Amino acid sequence: MTATSEQIRRVKVRPNYDHVAWKWMRYSALLLIPLVWFHVILQDVIVGVHTMDLDYVAQRWANIGWRVYDALLLGFAMAHGMNGVRQVANDFIKGERARTIMSWALFIFWLAITAIGAAALIGGVRQDFPLN
Amino acid sequence: MSTLKTTLTGYTGYRGREGHYAFLLHRITGLGTVLFLVIHIIDIALVYLSPKGFLDVVALYQTTLFGIGEIALVFCVFFHGINGLRIAYFDMFKPANWSIETERNSTRITLIATLILWLPATFFMARNILIHNYGLFGG
Ligand code: HEM
Ligand code: HEM
């Protein structure tokens, strides 16, 4: 019996897009645990939404380290999440053409939202805006 | 339309107990988090695009209704994260252990770990709402 299993030929298959995406979901997940959890515990539980205002964000973003942190969060969480949406959509949408259209639509949506987030991260808080 | 029906009846009709519920919950919590994330990136971007609008949005976040949504969001983030680690661990390091029995046990452990993180967080968030919105505990 062992003889047969030793005769199995190993073939190298070039990883396709979905294989890469499958791995990506798992590696990004390891990074997302510290990134997302620390962010949520800090903002939601320790600081809380009741003490948030423009000053709070301005103070945090005065530190370049937090901007880099937010940039990583923006890049990894959004890419992981949108690829997740693509996975779920693949369950509902059959057919080569429909899937291609769906993937492109999600890609453009991802690009647009990420660009908005990046604009704010680079631009910072516009506090000179006349409040009230 | 027929594929929609097949997929949906597959989601609800299959009776896989723990492993099946973990799959459904992982989907729902992942989709819930990404929905929040899209809204969240836009609301934070308002500090640059329209600071006045940002203050309106924060006021909305401080209402009790959104506070309850926040507590649900934190559950999603904790459960999805721990369950995601469980999936990644079996997939990458112990693929031979994907059996109904280990799936049942590991799903139970995942749920317990989620509750251990989520219940204290809920306590603090609920207390914040009671202090700021209802003037309790000397608020
Ligand atoms: C309701 C709970 C949350 C609160 C109160 C909150 C609060 C904040 C605040 C105040 C900022 C501004 C920058 C800073 O202070 O660092 C921010 C930025 C950000 N948060 Fe959250 N956050 C929450 C949940 C989440 C979750 C669950 C995610 C990821 C899935 C997330 C992803 C981000 C990202 C990507 C940014 C940067 C946005 C940008 O580039 O414009 N947040 N958050
Ligand atoms: C906190 C750390 C996180 C970990 C460890 C994690 C882990 C994972 C893993 C391993 C998968 C693949 C599941 C599979 O292929 O069967 C996945 C799917 C997914 N994740 Fe995450 N994730 C995390 C955070 C997030 C965040 C912040 C979002 C939302 C922005 C998100 C949204 C999704 C979605 C929508 C899916 C697809 C669900 C499905 O295919 O059923 N995840 N996650």
Image (spheres, rainbow, N blue to C red):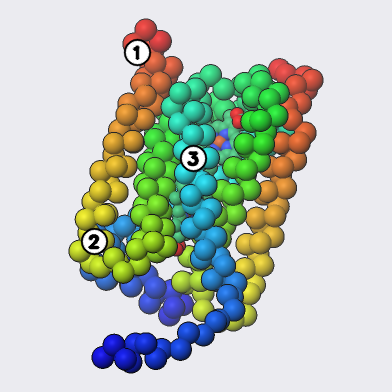
Image quarter where ligand 1 lies: top right
Residue at 39% across / 73% down in the picture?
Answer: B7
Mark 2 beta carbon near ligand 2 (under 8 Å)? no
| Residue in the foreground of this view, choosing between B96 and B19 | B96
Mark 1: which amino acid?
A: Leu
Relative to A74, say whether B124 is above or below.
above
Distance Cα–Cα, label 3 vs label 1: 33 Å
Residue A33 location (% of width, % of height): 47, 44
| Residue in the foreground of this view, choosing between A29 and A123 | A29
Which of the 4 quarters of the picture holds residue A74?
top right
**In this view of the protein, can residue B77 be seen by the observer?**
yes
Return the disc, 1 or 2, that comes first in the chain's sequence. Answer: 2
Q: Chain of mark 2?
A: B
Q: Chain of mark 1?
A: B
Residue B21 location (% of width, % of height): 29, 59
Distance Cα–Cα, label 3 vs label 2: 26 Å
Residue at 71% across / 36% down in the picture?
Answer: A121
Q: Secondary structure at mark 3?
A: helix
Q: Which residue is mark 2?
A: B102
Residue A119 location (% of width, % of height): 75, 40
Residue at 54% across / 71% down in the picture?
Answer: A19
The disc label shown at residue B136, or none: 1
Q: Chain of mark 3?
A: A
Distance Cα–Cα, label 1 vs label 2: 46 Å
Q: Same chain for marks 1 and 2?
A: yes
Residue at 57% across / 22% down in the picture?
Answer: A52
Count residues near mark 1 (Cα–Cα under 10 Å), then give few for <14, some for 14-19, many for 20+.
few
Question: Is A4 left or right of B4, judged from the image as shown?
Answer: left
Residue B29 location (% of width, % of height): 41, 51
